[in-house]
Each structure stands twice: as C-alpha cells, then as structure tokens.
Image: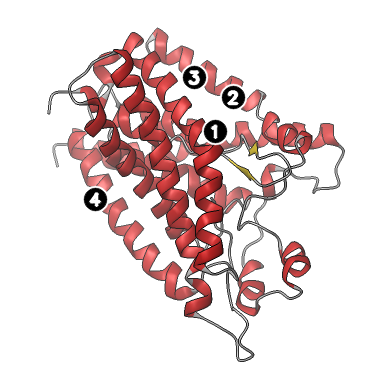
Amino acid sequence: MHIPDGYLGPQTYVPLYGVSIGFWAVALKKIKKELSAKQVPYLSMAAAFSFLIMMFNVPIPGGTTGHAVGGAIIAILLGPWTAVIAVSVALIIQAIVFGDGGITAIGANCFNMAIVLPFVSYWVFKLINGESRNGARMYSAAFLSGYIGLVVAATLTGIEFGIQPMIATAADGTPLYAPYPLAIAVPAMAVEHLILFGLVEGMVTALLVKSFVKNDAETVFALREA
Amino acid sequence: MTKFQKKLWIGIGIMALISPIGLILPEKFKAGDAWGEWGTDNIKEMLGYVPKGLERLSSLWSAPLPDYGFGGENAAPAAQYGAYIVSGILGIALVWLAVLLVKKTVLKQRENGQ
C-alpha cells in the first residue's frame, strides 16, 4: 500500500501532504496534552512494531503481495492520535531510507495508513466492543477493527490510484501517472485486502489486545472510561 | 521498563531477525510486487509504455537502502536475507531516534509547564 513516486500527480499528492501536515500538527498537540506517563514508553515500541510488520510481505499465491500495518492495534492501545504519529514515523523513514513509498507520496501514504486506518479501526473497535473488558465480544471487535481499517485504507489507496487517469493525461491521451482507472484500481486494492491482508491485520490486532488486557490492561486507551 | 515492556522489545527484536520470512514466502508462492508498486520496467511490460509523469517522478529520489537491501535484486538469497535483517534492525534504531526527538521536543515542553 506504499504508493511510490510517480503514481500520483501533484493535484493529488500536494493536497494530501496538506491534510497529513494538519493531522500531524493536531496529533503532536494531543500527545503533548494527553499522552499518559504510562503510555510514553510504548510510543517508540509502536513505531518500531509498525515499521517491522510492514516488512512481512504476505503473498497471494501467483498474485501480488501485501502486509499488515499495525495501525489498528496502536490506535486501540495508545489512541488514534498517538497512532497517527507512530505509524507516520515508520512510513517517513521507510520512504526516505528504504525507498518503500515515494517521497512525493509521503502525505498520501500517511493519510491512508497512519490517519484513516487508525481512526477507522478505533471507531470500529469502540462501536463493536461497547463496554466489554474481555471475552468474545472484545476479541471480535479487535479483529474487525484491524480488518475493516486495513480494507478501508486499501480502498482509499485504490481510489487515489484510480482517479489519476481522469486528472492528468499527456498530449497523446495516455495517462501521465498511475495508468489504471477506478474500475480496475479500486477492486484490485480492495479485494486483496478483503481476502487476505485484512485478515492478517485483524489477527495481529486481536492477539495483541489479548496480550495487553492480560499484562497491562490499564494502558489500553480504548478500554478507559469515556 | 516493566517486565512486560521488556518482553515486547524482545518480541520486536525477534521480528527483525525473522523478517526474511517476508521475502521467502512471496518467493515460495510466486507472488510478485504489491499492486501499484511496480518498477518502470514492469510497467513498460504491462502497458507497452511508461506514463511520462510517472517516469519523470519515479527517479526523483534514490533511497540509500532501496527495498531494505543493499545488494540489489541479483544478490545471493543469503545476502538478501542478511540485508533485510540489518535493515529491520536499522529501522528499529531510526524510528527509536525519531520518536526520541518527538518526545524531547513535545514532552519536554509539557514538563516545563508550557
């Protein structure tokens, strides 16, 4: 889901940089005001975890590869605004040092994976979990939080790819940037995450929620009193 | 650091050490690039041309360790796996430093009561 340089034109990547910068500014303010002392040690851990889990490419046999992001579990544990910073840090280093995701696409990639994903995942978890503190309901909420969050982020990425041919074409009519239209890009991105990669994000989320509830329940942001 | 946090950091270290699974599995199951992350050579094969804007922007940045490796796609598998592990460890160090910077600037101000 790391959009490389060249797939998005400036009409797309410039506004998405703007949106991401806005979210970063708010997120840093929120961290300053609200991140609890208990959560501070988990911030670097969360960023490292997100960085590494994205290296675990999962194959669709004979097809493409994809990966989990870790954004859902980070949003549940530390809150969605802290997840914005943790996942963005991982994505920015991946782009600059390892060429995974483009420099021009940092805003877009952070918007998809570090902003939309954690917020959707957090809302899904809160909505399904209600007030439960353990048991099947909480684990289902955690699984669906990761699953739906990643699928929504992938679909959004597909939309960003798919609108490129409508926005910019060369003089000879060929697309200037990502070449496939919405009708191809959106199903391609959505389906592979629906059938496989989303399941991985869901399972990782459920397993880690279980581990945290057992070992350090007080830290879990999404389980605190509203 | 609590015992649980120590365990989690060890888990993260183990993730880096076993990260080559992320290279081996796709190879075993003959899976290619992620959708929409093809190099310009592959795009040329798929479309018969490379979109002009894409071609221009794609060479904008040369990452020091592209694709978490430093030997290129033709390096021996063992070298690729080794480079992947080193990249994972380097990644941990770099995000740790970046987060430290965030903590120093953002949380420091909080301690000073600003």
Q: Given the image, what chain letter belongs to the residue carrying mark 3? A: B
B74 relative to B108 in the view: left or right: right
Q: Disc 2 on helix, strand or loop?
A: helix
A133 relative to B62 in the view: left or right: left
List the residue tagged with mark 1: A53
Residue for point 70% across, 31% down: B20
**Mark 4 Cα shell of 10 Å, populated few (<14), some (14-19), many (≥20):** some
Label for residue A26? 4
Q: Given the image, what chain letter belongs to the residue carrying mark 1? A: A
Q: Is residue A94 above or below residue A147?
A: below
Spatial CA distance of label 1 from label 2 is 8 Å
Q: Which quarter of the image is occupied by the C terminus of chain B?
A: top left
Q: Are marks 2 and 4 on the same chain?
A: no
**Mark 1 Cα shell of 10 Å, populated few (<14), some (14-19), many (≥20):** many
Residue for point 40% across, 28% down: A143
Q: Disc 1 on helix, strand or loop?
A: helix
Corner quadrant of residue A65: top right
List the residue tagged with mark 2: B15
Q: Tags 1 and 2 in contact by the CB under 8 Å rule?
A: yes
One can see residue B60 in this view: yes
List the residue tagged with mark 3: B9
**Mark 3 Cα shell of 10 Å, populated few (<14), some (14-19), many (≥20):** some
Nearer the camera: disc 3 or disc 1: 1
Residue for point 42% across, 52% down: A112
Q: Disc 3 on helix, strand or loop?
A: helix
Spatial CA distance of label 3 from label 1 is 14 Å
Q: Earlier in the sequence, mark 2 or mark 3?
A: 3
Spatial CA distance of label 1 from label 4 is 26 Å
Amino acid type indicated by mark 1: Ile
Q: Are marks 2 and 3 on the same chain?
A: yes
